[in-house]
Image: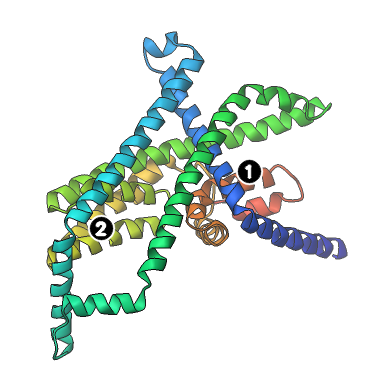
Amino acid sequence: MNERFRAMVHATVFAVLLGWVLHVGRDILVPVVFAILVVYVIIGAARLAARLPVVGAKLPVQVHYLLATALILGALLVLGWVALDSVDRLVAQVPHYRAQLVWMVQQGAGLLGIESEPSWQGIRDWVLGQVSVQALAGSTLAWLGAMLAGFTVVGLYVVFLMLERRHFDAKLGRLSDDPGRVARVRRIIGDINGRIGTYLALKTALSVLLGFASWVILALFGVELAPFWALVIGLLNYVPYIGSVLGVVLPVLFAVLQFGDLKTALLLAGALSVAQFLNGNLLDPYLMGNSLNLSPFVILVSLTVWTALWGVPGAFLAVPVTASIVMVLAEFDGSRPLAVLLSRKGEV
C-alpha cells in the first residue's frame, strides 16, 4: 500500500509539473504540434497519390510529397482567399447590418415596454462606452500579427520535419543496443502514426463533406458569406461536441442579423442541425468507428484541459494528442491501468 501511495503521489506531482510546463511553453509547443499534424496530412496525401492508377505508380515518392505539399498549399490559399473576400463583402454590407441591428433593438425595446426607441447613435455611444476601440484595434492587430508569425513558424517546422523524416528510422535504430527495445519503440510510433494519420484523414474528409453540405444549405436560404460560414463549420468539426454546437449557433446568429426574421433563422438552425446530426451520428461512427479508442467522457475532459492549457489551438489538438498519450501509456505495465480507464471499452 505504501508503494502504491508513493507512486500515486509521484504521478500527481509529475502531472502537475507537466501541466505547468505545457502551459508556460505553449507558444513554443503549439506550433511544433501543429507542424507534426501537417506532416501527417502531407504523408497521408502522398500515400493516396501513390495509389492512383497509372500515374501514381510511375512517379517517385519525392514527387508524391511535392504534389501533396502543393495541394495543401493550394487549399490554404483558397481558404485565405475565401476569408479575405468574406471580409470585403462584410464591410460592404455594414450599413445594411447596422440598420437591421437598430430595427431589432427597437423591436426588443417595444416588447420590453421601453418608451424611448433606441437609435443607432444611442447604440453606438453605449458600445463605445463599454469598449475601448483603440484597445480593441490594437489587440486585433496584435492577434493578426501573431497568427501570421505562427503560420510562418509552422511552415518552417514542416519543411525541416519533412527533410529530417528520411533519417528518422536510422536514428531510432541507434537509440539502444537492445534490438527488442528498438523494435518496441518502432511499433509504438508506427501504431501512433497509423491511428492518428487515419483519424486526421477521415476527419478532414468528413469536415470537407460537412462544409459542402452546410454551404448548400446556407446558399439555399440566401445567407450572405455562405462560403465563409461553410469554412468555419468545417474547421469547427475538428473540435469534439462543442464544435457542432458552434457550427449551428454562429451562422444562425448571423442570419438573424441579416434577415431580422426569427422564423427563417429557426428553419436554418433546423437544417444545419440535421446536417450536423447526420455527420456526427451516422457518417462519423460508420467511417471512423473506434479509430482512437477514447472514452467520450475522456474526450470531453481532454477538450476542457487542453483548451485551458493552450487556448483555442488546444481545442483542435485535444483528441490526437490525448490519443497519442493513451497509446504510450498502454505500452508500460505501470501506466497500463490508466490507459485502460481512458479507453472506450477497456481494450488497449
For the residue pair 196 and 73, the one nearer the viewer reads as: 73
Residue 191, located in which quarter of the rendered image?
Answer: top right
Q: For residue 251, which numbered disc appears in the image?
A: 2
* Residue occupying image coordinates x 17% and y 84%: 109
Q: For residue 327, which numbered disc appears in the image?
A: 1
Tell me how many marks there are: 2
Horizontal placement of 327 versus 242: left or right? right
Q: Secondary structure at mark 2?
A: helix
Q: Earlier in the sequence, mark 2 or mark 1?
A: 2
**In the rendered structure, which amino acid carries the disc numbered 2?**
Pro
Q: Residues within 10 Å of mark 1 (few under 14, many from 20)?
A: many
Residue 266 visible = no
- Residue 69 x, y percent position in the rendering: 44, 27
Q: Secondary structure at mark 1?
A: helix
Residue 95 visible = yes
In the displayed structure, 224 sits above or below 198; it is below
Report the colour scheme. rainbow
For the residue pair 101 and 232, the one nearer the viewer reads as: 101
Does the CB distance between marks 2 and 1 fall below 8 Å?
no
For the residue pair 61 and 202, the one nearer the viewer reads as: 61
- Residue 335 x, y percent position in the rendering: 72, 51
Q: Residue furthest front?
A: 134
**In the rendered structure, which amino acid carries the disc numbered 1?**
Met
